[in-house]
Image (cartoon, coloured by chain):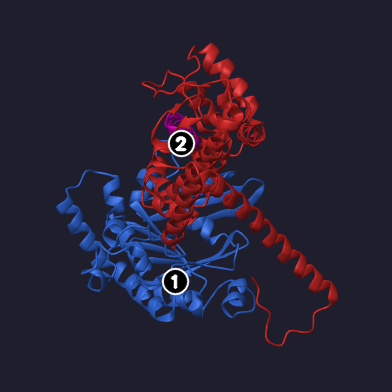
């Protein structure tokens, strides 16, 4: 069974059609990179996977999206529960104005009544997974806003991991970061793919080539090409993909 | 103010005159404000004393203090702002966070804007008809306080709506993305982050409510009642109306004139205090909004 399957997915915002019959499959513990020029629909596709588009007025969708074989747009599915299984990291770091500890504990306090000792355990585990523990373990009570941009983004990854999702969505997670912080996040994605399936939107083709197993290229709302990253960059089948990865547009 | 660069090109005459005019106008308005405060401090300061603040008025309001009016005004402001705080925060939250764009939402926003422009004496008449008569509250602190709450609602709703809208969308999405429901996101992220702004609005509104005369005229204010209220269903004296009485309808206006200036000074100082608190809250807000 695939981790993620999209079957002929089309999306409209009001009268504007943002996606045209997109279909793709992603296997467990793989990293899928979504690339393409601005406004191509890659972020729209990403936000379909945890139903974040539901909040946009005029949003309408056709087709099917399955996660672990389950239709996530079926009427009985509660999007709030879905989002606990599908974590998300945004373009800009979005720490809450709380302490580091409370930021990571945020998702845990929302749901099942965990004991404080269990929460402490899960916070530490999440911070270790996000490769931030050693830098903050003595300052857990400090405000998260005092961290550097790169640390804040790893904190947001820890916050997403703490609720133990199985699928992790990342929307250009390094576009607001310096090269060193970017390298750290990329290294982290490499580690996380052991446990998680990851879908990442990126503007940066080198990044897609470095970190992903599968690459999907979107253009004007259509999925132009989706293949193993190795083949995608060395031997693209579609002329438009070739033009994009050689920098002739976008 | 803009400082001119070291090698600024020579200014033309028109510019000199315009700069001078702007400077004169701004210094002029500051001077007028300082004049008003100075005048009130000079005239009111002559009667201001501990007794003036803590004792009831006596001898045809020519002697004693203004304590019953001061206490009455504080009660009225408290009732008005506490009531308005809940309603305006809820309404602002609905308009900013929960209502989907619709004709109905536009209609409410239009009504809120319109209500803000209605003269305060009309609110007084409405309060008389609704609270005093129809609901049978009589001339009472409750009736007057609720009328003042109505008066301050439009601006407070707008303020709350803007406070919620100013919380970064990214943080609300981050909370939703972790699996918080919309209600959880509102209470755990949006409301705490909007609170400083909402409080600032409430403090400024209490300054305005404190000085309103027309809405309390028919609903609560007593001409002469030198006692302290025991319940919210009693009428009371209030500072702005007391001031009006001292100047226009006392038994010996010449003799009550100095008391009027003292009352005005107390009103001014209270309002300045509230504005100061609001300024402090804004400063705290600036420090905490580093996201």
Q: Residue at x 30, y 62 (%)?
A: A158
What residue sits 54% from the left and 75% below the top?
Answer: A236
Q: Quadrant of residue B25?
A: bottom right
Q: What residue is drawn where x is 33% and y is 51%? A: A85
Farthest-out residue, left: A117
The magenta segment: B66-88
Q: Quadrant of the N terminus of chain B?
A: bottom right
Q: Secondary structure at mark 2?
A: helix
Based on the picture, tell me whether residue B85 belongs to the magenta stretch: yes
What is the C-alpha distance between the residues marked 2 and 1? 42 Å
* Closer to the camera in the image, A123 or B72: B72
Chain B, which colour?
A: red
Instruction: Tell me the subunit letter for badge 2.
Output: B
Pinpoint residue A4: horizontal percent, then vertical percent.
40, 55
Q: Are marks 2 and 1 in contact (CB under 8 Å)?
A: no
Q: Main secondary structure of the magenta part?
A: helix
Determine the chain carrying the residue at label 1: A
Crowding near the residue tagged with mark 1, few <14, some 14–19, many ≥20 C-alpha atoms within 10 Å: many
Instruction: Tell me the element at label 1.
Output: loop
- Left of A129 or right of it: where is B86? right
In blue, which chain?
A
Same chain for marks 2 and 1? no
Q: Viewed as shown, does residue A154 lie left or right of B240?
A: left
Q: Is residue B105 above or below residue B126?
A: below
| Picture coordinates of residue B58, whole percent (x, y) | 45, 26
Q: Nearer the viewer, residue A242 or B64?
A: B64
Residue behind mark 2: B85
Residue at image coords 27%, 54%: A105
């Amino acid at each position: 069974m695939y981790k993620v399957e999209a079957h002929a997915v089309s999306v409209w915002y009001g009268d504007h059609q943002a996606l045209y019959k997109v279909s793709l499959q992603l296997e467990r513990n793989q990293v899928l990179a979504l690339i393409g020029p601005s406004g191509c629909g890659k972020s729209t596709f990403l936000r379909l996977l945890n139903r974040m588009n539901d909040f946009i007025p005029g949003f309408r969708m056709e087709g099917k999206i399955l996660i672990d074989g389950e239709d996530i747009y079926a009427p009985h599915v509660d999007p709030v529960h879905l989002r606990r299984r599908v974590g998300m990291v945004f373009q800009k770091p979005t720490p809450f104005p709380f302490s580091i500890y409370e930021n990571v504990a945020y998702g845990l306090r929302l749901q099942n009544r965990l004991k404080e000792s269990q929460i402490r355990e899960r916070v530490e585990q999440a911070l270790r997974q996000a490769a931030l523990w050693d830098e903050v373990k003595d300052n857990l009570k400090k405000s998260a806003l005092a961290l550097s941009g790169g640390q804040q983004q790893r904190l947001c990854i820890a916050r997403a991991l703490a609720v133990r999702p199985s699928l992790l969505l990342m929307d250009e997670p390094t576009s607001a970061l310096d090269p060193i912080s970017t390298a750290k996040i990329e290294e982290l994605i490499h580690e996380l793919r052991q446990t998680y399936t990851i879908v990442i939107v990126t503007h940066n083709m080198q990044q897609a080539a470095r970190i992903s197993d599968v690459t999907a290229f979107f253009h004007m709302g259509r999925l132009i090409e989706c293949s193993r990253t190795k083949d995608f960059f060395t031997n693209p089948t579609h002329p438009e993909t070739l033009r994009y990865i050689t920098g002739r547009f976008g | 103010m803009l400082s001119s660069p070291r090698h600024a090109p020579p200014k033309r005459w028109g510019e000199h005159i315009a700069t001078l005019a702007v400077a004169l106008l701004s210094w002029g308005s500051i001077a007028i404000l300082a004049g008003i405060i100075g005048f009130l401090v000079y005239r009111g300061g002559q009667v201001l004393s501990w007794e003036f603040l803590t004792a009831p008025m006596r001898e045809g309001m020519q002697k004693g203090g203004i304590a019953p009016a001061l206490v009455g005004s504080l009660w009225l402001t408290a009732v008005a702002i506490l009531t308005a705080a809940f309603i305006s925060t809820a309404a602002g939250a609905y308009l900013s966070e929960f209502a989907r764009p619709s004709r109905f939402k536009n209609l409410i926003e239009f009504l809120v804007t319109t209500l803000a422009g209605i003269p305060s004496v009309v609110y007084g008449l409405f309060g008389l008809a609704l609270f005093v008569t129809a609901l049978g509250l009589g001339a009472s602190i409750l009736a007057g306080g609720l009328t003042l709450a109505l008066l301050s609602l439009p601006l407070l709703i707008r303020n709350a709506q803007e406070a919620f809208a100013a919380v970064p969308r990214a943080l609300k999405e981050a909370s939703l993305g972790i699996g918080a429901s919309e209600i959880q996101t509102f209470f755990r992220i949006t409301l705490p982050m909007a609170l400083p702004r909402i409080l600032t609005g409430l403090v400024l509104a209490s300054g305005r409510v404190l000085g309103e005369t027309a809405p309390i005229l028919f609903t609560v204010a007593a001409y002469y009642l030198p006692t302290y209220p025991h319940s919210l269903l009693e009428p009371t004296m209030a500072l702005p109306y007391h001031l009006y009485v001292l100047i226009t309808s006392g038994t010996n206006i010449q003799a009550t004139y100095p008391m009027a200036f003292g009352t005005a000074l107390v009103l001014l100082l209270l309002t300045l205090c509230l504005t100061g608190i609001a300024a402090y809250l804004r400063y705290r807000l600036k420090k905490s909004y580093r996201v």
